[in-house]
Image (tube, rainbow, N blue to C red):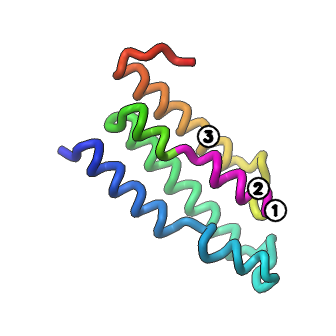
Amino acid sequence: MESPEQFLDRAMKLLQRSDPIPKLLPQVRLGRMPKDSPALTAILDSWLEAFVQVLKDAQAVLDVGGVLRLDPNPRIAVLVEAGVLPEDHLHVKSLRDAWSDALRAAQQRAGVPAS
């Protein structure tokens, strides 16, 4: 059985490998890749889906601190501000819901009342 620390380490590595911000966002900002590029859209969708899956898996493993480390909102904000991801994108809602569910599950396991 995987420990919470092992899960978090594996999850962070997975999300870092597929994170569009370090490699693709500079390409968009430099004008080398259009904001509406089908390739960019596919990569963003894939990253968002992977993030949702990590958070669903995290529900059974991570404590509150671990879930807080996986908060997707700062990264979503960067992508929205850059104009490559709409705030109302279906996967953005799914990701935020998955994070809230994971946080709620961790709080319940810890006996912390949900806020």
- The residue beneath circle 3 is 96
Q: Going by the image, does 99 lie left or right of 11?
A: right
CB under 8 Å between discs 3 and 2: no
Q: Residue furthest left?
A: 1
Q: Which residue occupies 51% across, 52% down?
A: 51
Percent position of residue 74, x then y: 64, 49
Q: Going by the image, does 23 lie left or right of 33?
A: left
- In what element is the residue under mark 2? helix
Q: Going by the image, does 70 lie left or right of 9?
A: right
Percent position of residue 47, x then y: 56, 61
CB under 8 Å between discs 2 and 1: yes
- The residue beneath circle 2 is 80
Percent position of residue 54, x then y: 44, 49
Rendered position, 4 above or below 81: above
Kind of residue at disc 2 = Val
- The residue beneath circle 1 is 83
Percent position of residue 41, x then y: 70, 67
- Quadrant of the image occupied by residue 67: top left
Q: Tell me if mark 1 has few (under 14), some (14-19) or many (20+) residues whose alpha carbon lies within 10 angstroms of its own.
A: some
